[in-house]
Image: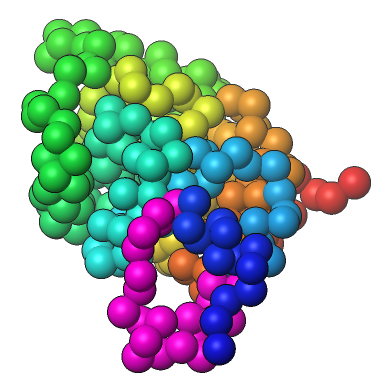
Amino acid sequence: MAPNDQARKNHDELFPGHVSTLAVTDPELIEYFDNFAFDEVLRHGTLDTRTRLMVQLAALIAVHGLGEYRVMVGAALTVGVTPVAVKEIVYQAVPYVGMGRVFDFLHATNEVLTARGVDLPLPGQSTTTPQTRAAKGLAVQQAIVGADRVAAMVAAAPADELHLQRYLAANCFGDHYTRTGLDLPTRELLTFTMLIAMGGCEPQAKGHVAANLNVGNDRQTLLSVVTQLLPFIGYPRTLNAVRLIDEVIPAG
């Protein structure tokens, strides 16, 4: 009992020389999981291999899949995702998943990179200063979300909640989205990925379906992302994500 030839080929390209202990202890599960994750779902969608691995890393952070994340970081590096890009995925998770969860993944990333001979720290990617982060963050937020939408959120916030809107502009967008290492369309895909993978974030995820459209990620791209995440986040969160896509970008 073993995965089919195509699944094995695709798996070996990502994990050369790796033999899963689960293939010995749980061969039935590994057979149909690998056939599904490394063959069937790979036949659907438009994502290139590097983008697929990046969104899967983001999803694994969101679901706290630390063990699988370690393995998949190695796969991402093998197919050409740069160390800077890997680290930026982790940084991008902080405002959405929280440092309480990201902390372990940051250490795991550093351990994998160090084991592969990558010198740390990596070159800095920040483009803001404490003096410019708020203005630059607001500009990026308006470009992604829409200036009218940002203004409406600020206008609707009670006086004792306005500080959260300032944090959103300066910290979430100013400290993170303004960084180099990943472009804005990729960052928006990662954000959408983390929100749907966590579950319970449907209002925010729906907003980021629209934001993805604003930066050039169309319905097919988002459906491709959701499909490639399915083996790692399960059907309920996948189907919830599809519903949000349908509500914002109806099939036509």
Verify whether residue 141 appears in magenta: no
Residue found 13% across the figure and 45% down from its top = 115
Residue found 90% across the figure and 46% down from its top = 252
Residue found 84% across the figure and 50% down from its top = 251
The image shows residue 50, relative to residue 21, as above or below, that is above
Q: Quick check: 122 left or right of 70?
A: left
Judge by depth and name the residue closer to the eye, 69 or 243: 69
The image shows residue 160, relative to residue 22, as above or below, that is above
Can the viewer see residue 127 in this picture? Answer: yes
The image shows residue 214, relative to residue 207, as above or below, that is above
Q: Quick check: 72 left or right of 145?
A: left
**Range shown magenta:** 14-35
Judge by depth and name the residue closer to the eye, 108 or 160: 108
Judge by depth and name the residue closer to the eye, 163 or 24: 24
x, y percent for residue 98: 22, 51
Residue reaching furthest to the front: 17
x, y percent for residue 25: 35, 90
Verify whether residue 17 appears in magenta: yes
x, y percent for residue 198: 39, 62
Q: Quick check: 108 left or right of 170?
A: left
Q: Quick check: 49 left or right of 162?
A: right
x, y percent for residue 10: 56, 57
Residue found 46% across the figure and 47% down from its top = 53
